[in-house]
């Protein structure tokens, strides 16, 4: 799949994943990415409306280890924005106006490499600066060793150091399957991982890993099934058969049982094996 960072639909997927995981990721982000020591976090409204509506990615009232209370504002950015410094300045003024508290702002760049966005404004009678950091500069092992699955997912965006990114993907997938949670929750994490790997152009390595681990996936994500869709059902069936240790004497029945276990529809199994629907239902 061609990675298109400027695709609005794709951008919406990235934003959705980040927003879904923001609360779970916040403690780790504060400690490991922002390098801050926060002892208390308080919820505050994140809708800013004076002359226009503004909704920050993440907004909290916090108290640090020295007792200082301030507004913590975090924005995630996947591509370079020449106007980012002005957006952050606008947020800062609105937040100070609304809460009458100091504001600390961070832009966390999740794209490849380091951010080159301007971080300060120096003009007559006006000076402004926000903090900028990149996930790609953070050691992936910091995220991987977290007990929070949402933070483990961020390992694919961190600095791989000397490790093969493919191995990091394997570790993240293994951690997902080790979780004692329902299939729906595992599916959610896998779908989020699929979105995040596009930020590092790792779609193909992920697909290859999923091919090897296909028994863990439901049919809609099963690579054998996807290959069957692309290259014909017969090739997909052959790959499925090759990966099974036991093949019954009746090949059509054996194939039908395998595909039924994977969750394929009775109609599709019937078309692939030429068995009747009643025969398949009895398996």
Image: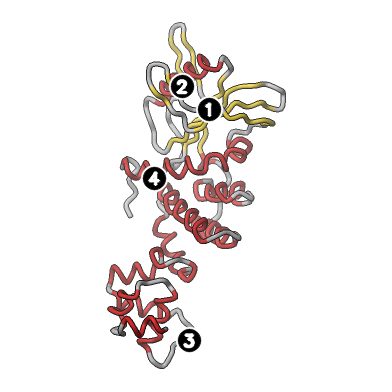
Residue that badge 4 annotates: 13
Residue nearest the observer in this picture, 206 or 22: 22
Q: Kindly state the secondary structure of the residue where label 2 is placed.
A: helix
| 201 relative to 105, above or below | below
Mark before the other along the chain sequence, 3 or 1: 1
Q: In this view, does 234 lie above or below 208?
A: below
Residue 79 lies left or right of residue 92; in this view the side is left
Dots 2 and 3: beta carbons under 8 Å?
A: no
Q: How far apart are marks 4 and 1 (CA)?
A: 22 Å
How far separated are the C-alphas under marks 2 and 3? 63 Å
| Residue 105 in picture, x, y percent from top left | 53, 25
Q: Which of 275 and 248 is in front in this view?
A: 275
Disc marking residue 246: 3
> Image quarter for residue 113?
top left
Q: Do the residues labelled 2 and 4 touch (CB within 8 Å)?
A: no
Tag 1 residue: 73
Badge 2 or badge 3: first in the primary sequence:
2
Give how far across and how far down residue 2 sits, in percent: 32, 52
* Dot 4 or dot 3, earlier in sequence: 4
Expressed as whole percent of the image width and height from the top left, the position of residue 223 reads 39, 67
Mark 4: which secondary structure? helix
* Left or right of residue 232, residue 280 in this image: right
Q: Is residue 186 above or below residue 33?
A: below
Nearer-N-terminus badge (2/4): 4
Location of mark 2 (residue): 91
Of the image marks 4 and 1, the number of the one nearer the N terminus: 4
Instruction: Check disc 4: other Cα within 10 Å, few if <14, some if 14-19, many if 20+.
Output: some
The quarter in which the C terminus is drawn is bottom left
Confirm or deny contact between disc 1 and disc 2 (CB under 8 A). yes
Q: How far apart are marks 1 and 2 (CA)?
A: 9 Å
Residue in view at x 55 percent, y 48 percent: 150
């Amino acid at each position: 799949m061609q990675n298109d960072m400027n695709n609005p639909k794709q951008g919406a997927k990235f934003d959705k994943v980040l927003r879904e995981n923001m609360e779970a990721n916040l403690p780790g982000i504060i400690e490991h990415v922002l390098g801050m020591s926060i002892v208390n976090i308080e919820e505050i409204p994140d809708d800013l409306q004076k002359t226009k509506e503004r909704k920050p990615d993440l907004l909290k009232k916090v108290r640090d280890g020295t007792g200082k209370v301030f507004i913590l504002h975090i924005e995630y950015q996947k591509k370079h924005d020449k106007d980012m410094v002005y957006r952050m300045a606008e947020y800062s003024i609105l937040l100070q106006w609304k809460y009458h508290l100091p504001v600390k702002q961070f832009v966390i760049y999740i794209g490849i490499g380091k951010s080159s966005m301007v971080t300060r404004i120096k003009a007559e009678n006006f000076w402004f600066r926000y903090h900028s950091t990149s996930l790609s500069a953070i050691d992936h092992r910091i995220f991987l060793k977290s007990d929070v699955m949402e933070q483990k997912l961020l390992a694919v965006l961190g600095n791989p150091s000397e490790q093969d990114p493919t191995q990091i993907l394997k570790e993240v997938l293994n951690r997902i399957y080790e979780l004692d949670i329902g299939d729906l929750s595992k599916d959610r994490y896998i779908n989020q991982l699929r979105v995040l790997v596009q930020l590092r152009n790792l779609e193909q390595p992920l697909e290859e890993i999923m091919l090897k681990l296909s028994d863990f996936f439901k049919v809609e994500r099963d690579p054998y099934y996807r290959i069957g869709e692309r290259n014909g059902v017969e090739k997909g069936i052959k790959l499925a058969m090759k990966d099974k240790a036991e093949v019954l004497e009746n090949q059509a029945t054996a194939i039908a049982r395998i595909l039924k276990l994977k969750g394929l529809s009775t109609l599709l199994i019937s078309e692939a094996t030429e068995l009747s629907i009643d025969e398949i239902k009895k398996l």
